[in-house]
Amino acid sequence: MKKRGERLFACAMAGMLLMGSMAGCGSASSSSGEAAKGSTVSSAAEASTAPASAAESEAASSAAQSSAAESSSAPESSAAESAAAPSEAPAGFNYEPLENTDGKEIRIATLTVSNNPFWNTVVEGIAAAEEYLAGQNVTVDVIEFDDFDGQAFADAIDTCIVKDYDAITTVGVADTIVPAIDKATAAGIPVYTFNSDTEKESTRVAFVGQDLYAAGGVAAQKLAELMGDSGKVGIITGYYNVNAHELRRQGIEDELSGHSGIEVVGSVENHDSGDEAYTAAKDFITANPDLTGLIVTAGGPQGAAKAIEELGLEDTISLVCFDTTDEIVGYVKKGVIKGTVTQDPFGQGCDPIVLAYNQVISGEAAVTGKAYTKMDVYTPDNIAEAFPD
């Protein structure tokens, strides 16, 4: 068993599940994950009502997001949320934890990925939920994997069932985990997915994360605007077998197909790697000297930004991506990255744990289906206000 600090780790590459208990999970530093944001995250959105908002200064992207993400809104109150909470939840919590009046011990397992800096802020959200709920006699065991190995996740869920956890939250890495999710549900263990949902239907209670297809459309519309609706675009995506990345890519391609002056010259995987994105960007530029647009669907956009900057093409190639890690924010401020779309990674870590805990306490789910997180679009014009130096 491998243990780092008080957080548990699992190596998906080796297919080994490393389990144990932890008493108090410390949060990862925001300097290596999502940059600290100046304002509190707004409430997470539940499917089928009002649209999510884009950054206030992004009028064009706001209109696109309102039409594309119309299923996102603040969750409705329910009997499960009417019980008294232990105290006001900290900033960044989108759901109010209930009070564990019986004081019963509750154990929640959380399965996440840790293959690029984006996930550091997800883990911060997980740690914040664990720290806050510790006073309610809740233990959160965090199992981290170095990549999106569906079988390793499925095996981990099976182990959590054997260990009789009260609830499970997991990245919906692949359809491979669906049988394990269904088995957990049949055993009376509620399962929540976050960040990515499975493509195949499962009995999970809810998905907490970005409206990924809509986000792809928002990013593509911003890119088309930057390119003046004309030119060649290369797409760098994380993994073709990760549903979240594919939904974004499909949203991007569908949006760009409606811009007759724009040609998508191809797409390649970079496996969330900055080094691979760097190589892919240079390859796209070499093969297409007249390239004017690049878009990165997942991790590693700083590599593409580095390539553009080294070649002195900041004023020629518009680069759009997702998330606000320190490196991404730095490149946006320098004007190398022209736009980035956010997804509330802190909430993606925290919210499913709180929702799962509340369900264990109340006996009912406050949210089912899809609980979409907030989307903002940041550009060199508005990034400093949200992420001051």
Image (cartoon, rainbow, N blue to C red):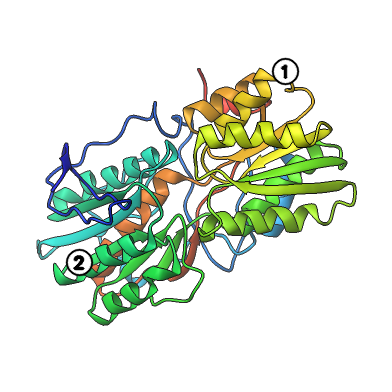
Count of marks overlaid on the render: 2
Residue 274, percent from left and from top: 52, 33
Foreground: 56 or 350? 350
Question: Residue at the spot x=53%, y=57% of the render?
Answer: 244
Label 1: element kind? loop
Q: Which mark is residue 116?
A: none
**What residue sits right under mark 1 in the picture?**
312
19 or 139: nearer the viewer = 19
- Does 232 appear above or below 143? above
Give the structural element (helix, strand or loop) at label 2: helix
Residue at 74% of width from left, 31% of height from top? 286
Work out which residue is located at the far bottom of the displayed protein and give it.
186
Mark closer to the chain start, 2 or 1:
2
Q: Nearer the viewer, residue 268 or 61?
A: 268
Tell me if residue 365 comes above or below residue 262 in the rendering.
Answer: below
Question: Could you tell me residue 38's position as x and y percent?
Answer: 48, 29
**Residue at which label 2 appears:** 159
Q: Position of residue 79 (x, y in %)?
A: 34, 72
**Tag 2: amino acid:** Thr
Q: Amino acid at mark 1?
A: Gly
| Residue at the image point whose x is 31% and y is 66% from the top | 154
The residue sitting at 52% across, 60% down in the picture is 241
Mark-to-mark CA distance, 2 and 1: 51 Å
Q: Is residue 374 visible?
A: yes
User: Mark 2, residues whose alpha carbon is within 10 Å: few (<14), some, or many (≥20)?
Assistant: some
User: In the figure, is residue 240 to the left or right of 356?
Assistant: right
Q: Nearer the viewer, residue 364 or 160?
A: 160
